[in-house]
Image (cartoon, helix red, strand yellow):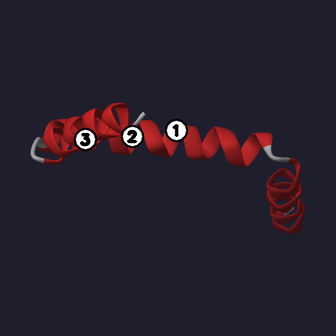
Amino acid sequence: MLDELLRVYVTMMDFATSPVALVILGLAGASLGAKAAETIPFTRRIIERRAAQRD
């Protein structure tokens, strides 16, 4: 298991030296974060309350 974690760490360090890869990882993270915020019921209620206050 440690070997697999080390392999992932080394791969991520290679990504850290490439600006294009960092942008891609950032966009993927932002997309997943937005999906998670819509999926989790607690955050969905917060979003709905804010939308209702604007109207």
Left or right of 1, for residue 40:
right
Q: Are marks 1 and 2 in contact (CB under 8 Å)?
A: yes
Q: Secondary structure at mark 3?
A: helix
Residue at point 27%, 43% (across, down) = 9
Q: Residues within 10 Å of mark 1 (few under 14, many from 20)?
A: few
Which x, y percent locates residue 45?
89, 56
**For the C terminus, which image quadrant?**
bottom right
Q: Disc 3 and disc 1: Cα gap in Å?
A: 19 Å
Label whose residue precedes the other's in the sequence (2 or 3): 3
Q: Amino acid at mark 2?
A: Leu
Which x, y percent locates residue 54?
81, 65
Residue at point 84%, 62% (across, down) = 46
**In this orientation, which residue lies closer to the viewer: 8 or 52?**
8
**In this orientation, which residue lies closer to the viewer: 4 or 15?**
4
**For the N terminus, which image quadrant?**
top left
Q: Which mark is residue 31?
A: 1
Mark 3 lies on residue: 12
Q: Which mark is residue 27?
A: 2
Q: Residues within 10 Å of mark 3 (few under 14, many from 20)?
A: few
**In this orientation, which residue lies closer to the viewer: 16 or 43?**
16
Q: Amino acid at mark 1?
A: Ser
Q: Disc 2 and disc 3: Cα gap in Å?
A: 16 Å
Which x, y percent locates residue 21?
21, 36
Q: Amino acid at mark 3?
A: Met
Residue at point 87%, 68% (across, down) = 53
